[in-house]
Image (cartoon, grey):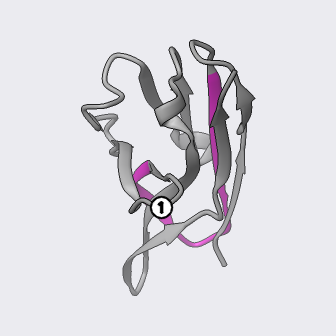
């Protein structure tokens, strides 16, 4: 069984910072790519950032230069450092992982953590 524990969301003023973390637990698997997605009220879910097992990263244009994704493979954890936050960054942020098991690869999702950017 694969479990996600997400943390770090909350309320922050414009220009502030938050750090999201997602720890994946379980046994009998290896994690390939990990990432963060977000869904704002009334909008579709969108990719924020991804990172491969080899630490190659991709970012949405809207967060480039402000957000940084990183991972700790030994702890099966992915982080998202968010700086210079804007009200438009307000959304539920969900952790994503492509997990490889003996029978194949499947995509898993965390439940999400709310980030609110407001004065």
Look at the image and tell me whether residue 71 can be seen: no
x and y percentages locating residue 79 in the rendered image: 56, 35
Q: Is residue 58 magenta?
A: no
Quadrant in the picture for the N terminus = bottom right
> In the picture shown, does residue 57 fall above or below 77?
above
- The answer to which image quadrant residue 67 occupies is top left
Q: Is residue 29 magenta?
A: yes
> In the picture shown, does residue 8 fall above or below 14?
below
**In this rendering, position of residue 96 left or right of residue 23:** left
**In this rendering, position of residue 33 left or right of residue 119:** left
For the residue pair 63 and 29, the one nearer the viewer reads as: 63
> In the picture shown, does residue 65 fall above or below 35?
above
x and y percentages locating residue 112 in the rendered image: 63, 57
Per the picture, the main secondary structure of the magenta-coloured stretch is strand
The residue stretch that appears in magenta: 18-35
For the residue pair 59 and 99, the one nearer the viewer reads as: 59
Residue at 44% over, 25% down: 68
Residue at 67% over, 19% down: 13
x and y percentages locating residue 38 in the rendered image: 48, 51
- The answer to which image quadrant residue 63 occupies is top left
Look at the image and tell me whether residue 72 can be seen: yes
x and y percentages locating residue 26 in the rendered image: 67, 67
Counting other residues with Cα less than 10 Å from the Cα at mark 1, is it few (<14), some (14-19), or many (20 or more)?
A: few
User: Mark 1 — residue?
Assistant: 42
Residue at 53% over, 57% down: 41
Q: For the residue labelled by badge 1, is the local secondary structure a helix, a strand or a loop?
A: loop
**In this rendering, position of residue 50 left or right of residue 9:** left
Quadrant in the picture for the C terminus = top right
For the residue pair 79 and 17, the one nearer the viewer reads as: 17
């Amino acid at each position: 069984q694969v479990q996600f524990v997400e943390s770090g969301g909350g309320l922050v003023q414009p220009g502030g910072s938050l750090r999201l973390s997602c720890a994946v637990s379980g046994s009998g698997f290896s994690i390939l790519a990990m990432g963060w997605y977000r869904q704002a009220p009334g909008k579709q879910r969108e990719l924020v950032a991804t990172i491969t097992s080899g630490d190659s990263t991709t970012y949405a244009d809207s967060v480039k230069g402000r957000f940084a994704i990183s991972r700790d493979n030994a702890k099966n954890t992915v982080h998202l450092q968010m700086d210079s936050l804007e009200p438009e960054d307000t959304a539920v942020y969900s952790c994503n992982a492509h997990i490889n098991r003996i029978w194949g690869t499947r995509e898993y999702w965390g439940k999400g953590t709310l980030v609110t950017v407001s004065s």
